[in-house]
Amino acid sequence: MELPEEPMMLYSFINMKLRDFYPSLDALCEDMNVDKENIIRKLKSVGLEYSAERNRFW
């Protein structure tokens, strides 16, 4: 699947998917066949980090 390139759009998309469909970032990445490290790197570039406890980026 093609993910949004713009970090804030990616942030919104990933958090919506995590909230509505996936119990973890690992599950999302595996199911959607996307690179977890790439998502983490892009969102970290705008100051966002993944919280496994909250299952979201913030």
Image (cartoon, rainbow, N blue to C red):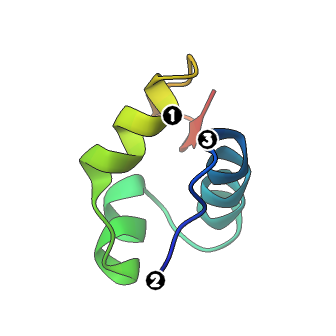
Q: In this view, does 35 lie to the left or right of 55?
A: left
Residue 43's label in the rendered image is 1
Amino acid type at mark 3:
Pro
The residue under label 3 is 7
Mark 2 to mark 3 CA distance (whole Å):
16 Å
Closest to the observer: 55 or 36?
A: 36
- Residue placed at 41% from the left, 55% from the top? 25
Residue 8's label in the rendered image is none
Q: Is residue 47 left or right of residue 28?
A: right
The residue under label 2 is 1
Mark 2 to mark 1 CA distance (whole Å):
18 Å
Residue 21 lies, with reference to residue 36, above or below; the image says below
Q: Residue furthest top?
A: 47
Verify CB contact (< 8 Å) between mark 2 and mark 3: no
Choose the circle earlier in sequence order: 2 or 3. Answer: 2
- Residue placed at 32% from the left, 48% from the top? 38
Mark 3 to mark 1 CA distance (whole Å):
6 Å
Choose the circle earlier in sequence order: 2 or 1. Answer: 2
**Mark 2, secondary structure of its residue:** loop
- Residue placed at 53% from the left, 44% from the top? 55
Q: Residue 28 at x, y = what percent?
A: 42, 68
Q: Residue 40 at x, y = what percent?
A: 38, 38
Residue 27 lies, with reference to residue 26, above or below; the image says below
Classify mark 1: residues with Cα within 10 Å, few (<14), some (14-19) or many (20+). many
Closest to the observer: 34 or 18?
A: 34
Amino acid type at mark 2:
Met
